[in-house]
Amino acid sequence: MSTLQIDGVAKQYGNRTVLHDITLDLASGEFLSLLGPSGCGKTTLLRIIAGFEQPEHGQVRVDGRDITALPANQRQLGMVFQAYSLFPNMTAADNVRFGLRVRKINAAEQKRRVDTMLDLVGLSAHADKYPHQLSGGQQQRVALARALAIQPALLLLDEPLSALDAKVRVQLREEIRRIQRETGITTVFVTHDQEEALSISDRVAVMFEGRMVQVGTPAAIYQEPAHAFVAQFIGISSRLPARVIDAEQGQIAVLGQHLVAPRARGLAPQDALHLYLRPEDVQVHALNGSTPPGAVLQGTVRETTFFGAVTRLRVELDSGERLLSDLPTSAAQHLPIGSRVHIGWQADAMRLLPAQEQP
Amino acid sequence: MSRRRTSGTADAGRHIPWSGAVLLLVVGLYFALPLIATGVFSFWEGGTRYGPSAYISLVHQDALWESLWLSLRLALETIGLSLLVLVPAVFWMHLRVPRLKSLFDFISVLPFVVPPIVLVAGLTALFHGPDWFVGTPNYLVAPYVILALPYTYRALDVGMRALDLRTLTEASHSLGAGWGLFILRVLLPNLASALAGAALLTIAIVMGEFTFANVLLFNTFAVYINYIGQTSATEAAALTLLSFVITWLAMLGVLLSGRGKGQAQLGGAR
């Protein structure tokens, strides 16, 4: 098991900077996902770690050893690619054996490791099949076995599930996590799929426009977004304009209403903010003369979307802003389109971020 | 009902309409008749006698075998030099500078637009070198590489386009392999069909090439066929057929090699 340190790595293509001063530490045995939209620099960063790209600045260290200038074939890192990368002229077993033959490991040990790895990925019965005789999911499993067979210091996964259909993707991501836990290998997983990243990672590093905007546990990334991009990219949020009224007491103004927001304490007075609310945190009640406790704003239900146990309401506030609310379907049945409603939320459901931090 | 219709459609797809059959027959005769006539003529021994005397006579001519071996040797040398130059060049173009593909395409068709007689005149004026090269049939390898360029390049280009070279290269490097190991263990085996195609097309071209060899005064197989044609008509017909068979075998090899296991089939094929 190895550690990885990325220290101030920057990369440019011509005049375009694709990575800005990236610093990241991975503990031994950790599973970290690099998450972000296309073009955010996550694959470039992975390729720099793998040795396929050279950074303009910064260092990559494995177990404290600087490998920045080391060629890819001397880094002892296993990699699974987005595209199917098995050698078409070799069987599954020969593909797994390739890295071992390169290292001139003796035949008996080669056979033992090939058998172990194919067994680990559940493909022992397919050892003699050529890549074109395997499904996409099986090919990626073999690629994983091939990467692990060389007992690499790190495992690098470059969107290995993106070419697979949804069902296989879920199965294989769980399998990747199981194998990673069993082998204890330090892993960097690149994905643009937040569900994938949140479900299998120890930590998630969210990237945006070449910057690492937040690194944290999946729960922290979801519940405590530290950047406007994270708040909007991870899960679904509604955004409302807000302003700090009393930083000491933690008071903010939202669409003319003064609210107590513990997270506003310490912010500068008059700071323009954005208030983010998850649909599951937004409570909606029919407007029937009495004001329920916690109600803040009023609006009209404009759209309902049925998701089975939950129904999502799109509510247009009287001020013109829009909010999403997820209600149990049984409760949402009483709020058809056009219903006038009270809207409220718990104080700790509010995530506040500076308004100038636009994604 | 729908099954019957589907079945009927499939049957109709297999059935060749009479107009097509007539066209095929006419085209077939256009190709076959000269060959049949040449074959019949090659067995003519004068008057109404037919026999294998032309073939027997040819078999006993040392000059024929010398010219045949010379052409085969030149074909092998041409294949070797072509692949040595083109495999790395086309690989590098696909991997690192795909924007140069149109330039490669352009250069590869130049031998089609420059007549061989112009090429040979240019070669004679331009090439000066040691006697072992310029003074021997080895000199022919240079123009033959150029002559075979369109076919060799196309075969390699198609073969490499079928592979995800970048991913395969990086996968190989990530497993610890250097360039040499990658080329030997991954690239060349996956290009087997393309290499075989390029080689067999080159054999077909070199075996039939006349202009360069004749002008540069080398006695290759094609030059010998021409010589025999001027001295013995039936033996020339027999040699023409022999040459045709060699070319056909090479072409058949190209077709068969494209169907082999070595043909690259990347993921998701199932």
Image (spheres, coloured by chain):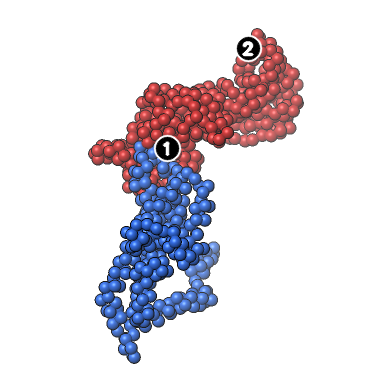
Chain colours: A red, B blue
- Check disc 2 and give the amino acid type: Arg
* Chain ID, mark 2: A
Horizontal side of B60 relative to B195 (left or right) equals: left
- Check disc 1 and give the amino acid type: Val
Image height of B57 relative to B184, above or below:
below
- The N terminus of chain A sits in image quarter: top left
Q: Which residue is found at the position 45% from the left and 75% from the top?
A: B31
Q: Which residue is found at the position 37% from the left and 67% from the top?
A: B207
Q: Quick one: A228 or A319, which is closer to the camera?
A: A228
Q: Nearer the viewer, mark 2 or mark 1?
A: 1
- The C terminus of chain A sits in image quarter: top right
**CA distance separating discs 2 and 1:** 46 Å
**Contact (CB < 8 A) between labels 2 and 1?**
no
Of labels 2 and 1, earlier in sequence is 1
Question: Share a chain, discs 2 and 1?
Answer: yes
Image height of A345 relative to B114, above or below:
above
Question: Which residue is the site of mark 1?
Answer: A80
Question: Which residue is the site of mark 2?
Answer: A265
Mark 1 element type: strand
Look at the image and tell me whether residue A273 can be seen.
Answer: yes
**Hey, which residue is sitting farthest bottom in the picture?**
B47
